[in-house]
Image (cartoon, grey):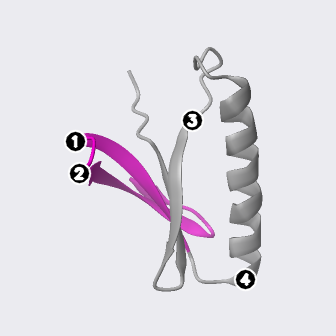
Amino acid sequence: LGSAAFSRAVQALDVRTNTLVCLKIVKNNKDYFDQSLDEIKLLKFVNTRDPNDEHGVVRLYDYFYYKEHLFLVCELLRAN
């Protein structure tokens, strides 16, 4: 889907829900990791304050650490 200075975004299939998601893969760097942890905290905070998705903020579904990379599992957004 794209890449940025400290991460890359790819489309993936969540096999548990059979839905397409966006995986944000953070590069293996302590500063990027710390910044991404702040992003997770912020998205969790905003998502809990907007449970009905009235404000159009991306939904963070999950996150995990694998092979020294942080992965964020988010809703897949597309241009309409």
Q: Quadrant of the C terminus?
A: top left
- Residue 9 in the magenta stretch? The answer is yes
Residue type at mark 1 is Asn
Image coordinates of residue 40 in percent, x first then y, are 68, 53
User: Dot 3 lies on which element?
Assistant: loop
Q: What residue would you read off at disc 1?
A: 18
Q: Mark 4 highlights which residue?
A: 30
The amino acid pointed to by label 2 is Val
The residue tagged 3 is 58
Determine contact: label 4, label 3, CB under 8 Å. no
Residue found 29% across the figure and 42% down from its top:
20
Mark 1 and mark 2: span between their CA atoms?
5 Å
Q: Is residue 39 magenta?
A: no
Highlighted magenta segment, given as a residue range = 1-26
> At label 3, which amino acid type do we have?
Val
At 43% across and 35% down in the image, what residue appears?
A: 77
Q: Secondary structure at mark 1?
A: loop
Q: Quadrant of residue 6?
A: bottom right
Residue 32 located left or right of residue 1? right
